[in-house]
Image (cartoon, helix red, strand yellow):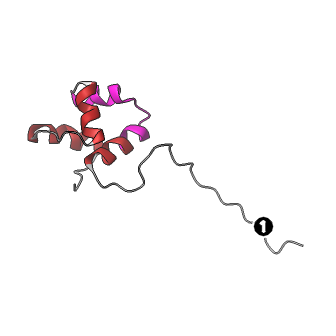
Amino acid sequence: MRFCEVTLKASKPIAGNPLELRTLGDHLKRRRLELKLEQRDAAKLLGLSKRNYQAWEWGDKRPRLRKWVSITRFLGYLPAV
């Protein structure tokens, strides 16, 4: 005997999507995955080589000050990192 019938729905998390945004790389990766882009496509949008984009996403390098305008446009906000 059922007391009530409930159906729960939620969107499936994107594989590899960071849950906590601790670094710039986490922010970049989450946005890239939301847009369903590969790293080379995200790099092109930011005016970078794939290698430089990867270095940012993986935390190996930090962007120069002049690139923060592009980053803010790509993310839609200025990340606090």
**Residue at the spot x=24%, y=52% of the render?**
79
Viewer-proximal residue among 54 and 71: 54
The furthest residue to the front: 60
Residue 63, horizontal then vertical, whole percent? 16, 39
Residue found at x 52% / y 48%: 13
> In the image, residue 20 lies at what x, y percent?
38, 56
Q: Is residue 46 above or below residue 72?
A: above
Name which quarter of the figure residue 55 lies in: top left
> Image check: 12 left or right of 67?
right
Quarter holding residue 59: top left
* Residue 2 spot, x, y in % from top left: 85, 71
For image coordinates 30% across by 40% down, the residue present is 58
Q: Nearer the viewer, residue 76 or 32?
A: 32
- Residue projecting furthest to the left: 65
Q: Residue at x 28, y 29 (%)?
A: 43
Q: Amino acid at mark 1?
A: Glu
- Side of 25 where 6 appears, left or right: right
Outermost residue toward the right?
1
Q: Quadrant of the C terminus?
A: bottom left
Residue 67, position as x, y percentages in the image: 15, 37
Q: Where is 47 relative to 16, above or below?
A: above
Give the residue pinned by disc 1: 5
In this picture, which residue range is highlighted in magenta? Answer: 31-47
Secondary structure of the residue carrying tag 1 is loop
